Amino acid sequence: MSSPTHYRQDLNNYAIQAGLTLTYKEASEGPQHSITWTVTAYIGGVEHGKGVSGSKGQAKEIASYNAMVALGLIQI
């Protein structure tokens, strides 16, 4: 994945332009020293992407990337 720090912003811009609401559901599990974050991206109340990482921010970026792929905004 290139420029992973921009997927969240790009997905937010897409949602705004489409007049849809972008929300994220965040969940963590595991011991404090080794937390695993799972973040799910919803656009218009519909799940479009999920990301898992040891970092909440990175999990959100992955979820945003996966949502953009699911929406056809990124070709893989």
Image (tube, helix red, strand yellow):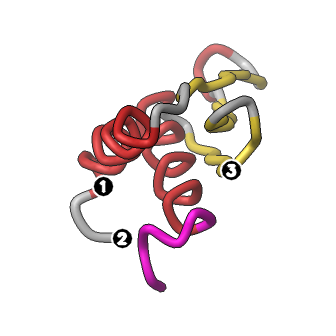
Check disc 3: other Cα within 10 Å, few if <14, some if 14-19, many if 20+.
Answer: some
The percent position of residue 25, horizontal first and vertical second, equals 68, 23
Nearer to us in this view, 59 or 11? 11
Question: Above or below — where is 1 with respect to 18?
Answer: below
Segment colored magenta: 70-76
Looking at the rendered structure, the secondary structure element under dot 2 is loop
Question: Above or below — where is 24 with respect to 38?
Answer: above
Considering every residue shown, the one lying at the far bottom of the view is 76
Left or right: 40, with 7 as reference point: right
Residue at 50% over, 37% down = 60
Nearer to us in this view, 34 or 11? 11
> Which of the labelled discs sits on residue 1, or is there none?
2
Looking at the rendered structure, the secondary structure element under dot 3 is strand
Distance from disc 1 to disc 3, alpha carbons, whole Å, reads 17 Å
The residue that label 1 is drawn on is 4
> Which of the labelled discs sits on residue 48, or is there none?
3
